[in-house]
Amino acid sequence: MDLKAVFHYSYFIHPIVISADRRKAFLERLLADKSWRFNTGRNEADTNTQAYFLPYVKRLLFPTVFWSSAFHASFERMDHKKQTDMVASLPSASFDLRLDHAAIGKGPFTRDHLGVEITRITLFCFESGITFLVIKTILDSKDVLYMGDVLDFNHKFRTLNPRYLKKQKTDGLFIRNTGFGKPGELSSFIKKLLSGFEDLETENVYFDRLFTYSYLCLDETEWNAEKPFERILNEFGKFRYVLPSDYGSEFDPAYTEKESSSYRRWKYSMTGFSRESCVVLASACEAFNRNKLPEYFETLYFHIFLLAFYQRISLILFSEEMTNAENIRVEEMKRRFTRFTHFSWFSQITNSEHGMELWKKWQDTFDLAAQFNEVQKEYQEYYDYKVAKGQERINILLVVIYVISVFFSALTLLVDAKALRLDTRVAQWMTGVICVGTAAAYPIYVLFRTFAGRVKRRIRRRTS
């Protein structure tokens, strides 16, 4: 079924973890690079988006909204170092790549009459080091745009993850921009952007693909009162799960209708959620779907998704950290997890009823509540384990102190009873060796445990 479409755009999101000790340097480079613009959130679209959320959510997603006009002017006059310090202190910061002209050349995934344009590249940087590279694309049709074109494009484009492409052959996708100097592969641009900053030891949650966030409005002749949504249910399933147009299997309508990962508030639009994508399929028979809904989907609803996505990646990283928790400082982890709970974990994010419904959908899709409870449990178990290990070390130290005290008490009794003479060289050497050995027993034990732990970690890294 080749459905005619009238409007489309797709966002592709690449989640990245910037090393904690390199985050400030990463922000410093972005601020110094004239091809990147720090987003202060002062245009009309940003203001409308900020007003949609409750104050504590704004502080996380749009911290500069609380800057006064005078402070904005002061920030512009600051030197580079002070600007870096200021941006690094924010809970989040976003940067837009200045695209005077950006396009991707035709690739084998498109039909002959199609071209692809990149209209925006944005970086959302959170203080935890979690960063999202967001790429907005539009299929430009010289003739007619079909839903099959969008399906095939989304399916191919999402594999442009640089880590994944180390093992795969690229289809030759290129980006052109005055800031790049010459055409280069988009994946190479991403790799160059992150080189030296990305935490490569952290497992990438989306290793082989980018998260897909896509809007598609069908021609009113394809979905209307006479042609109901059930007629295109299978195409919607392929759209939601980012499958190609020629995907061989057909979705079971009975199963699809029962899924909780679909949301339909208005008659001629359907939203689909998954851990790999979020899509809206709409019909142009309603003007709202051509004019307002696309705008809401990429501003208000996108930031609802971004917050949920940030929570999911954060919780996965906390859980991963617990798995390799041999050398973690308990107090440091407690500080970071407590900060995440206080400033990033919300049950209410907006006064909008529709916004809250979408928020709950994302919580269910990403299974955030269960993830949070699991991390809390893992942390508590790890904390109890570390407390027990600390108590064990204290017990060993007490035993050492006890042995030393008993030794000296016995030595004193033997000397007083004239059963032992300390004026001989052999007795002095034996006494000195026993004293030093007893006193050094616990420090030697601690050094041995530390060295053994490092050896184990090196072996684990080499085998992985």
Image (tube, rainbow, N blue to C red):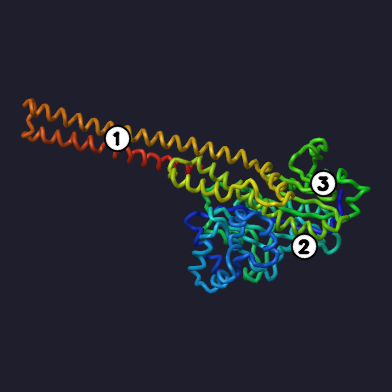
Q: Is residue 219 left or right of residue 464?
A: right
Q: Quadrant of residue 120?
A: bottom right
Instruction: Give the labeled residue for mark 2.
Output: 115
Q: Residue at x 91, y 47 (%)?
A: 227
> Nearer the observer, disc 2 or disc 1?
1
- Say which label, 2 or 1, has the lower sequence index: 2
Front residue of this view, candidates 262 and 178: 262
Instruction: Give the labeled residue for mark 3.
Output: 235
Callout 2 touching callout 1 (CB < 8 Å):
no
Label 2 secondary element: strand
Instruction: Give the labeled residue for mark 1.
Output: 397
Q: What amino acid is found at the position of numbered circle 2 in the picture?
A: Gly
- Circle on res. 186: none
CA gap, disc 2 and disc 1: 72 Å
Q: Residue at x 44, y 35 (%)?
A: 385
Give the farthest residue toward the bottom: 77
Label 1 secondary element: helix
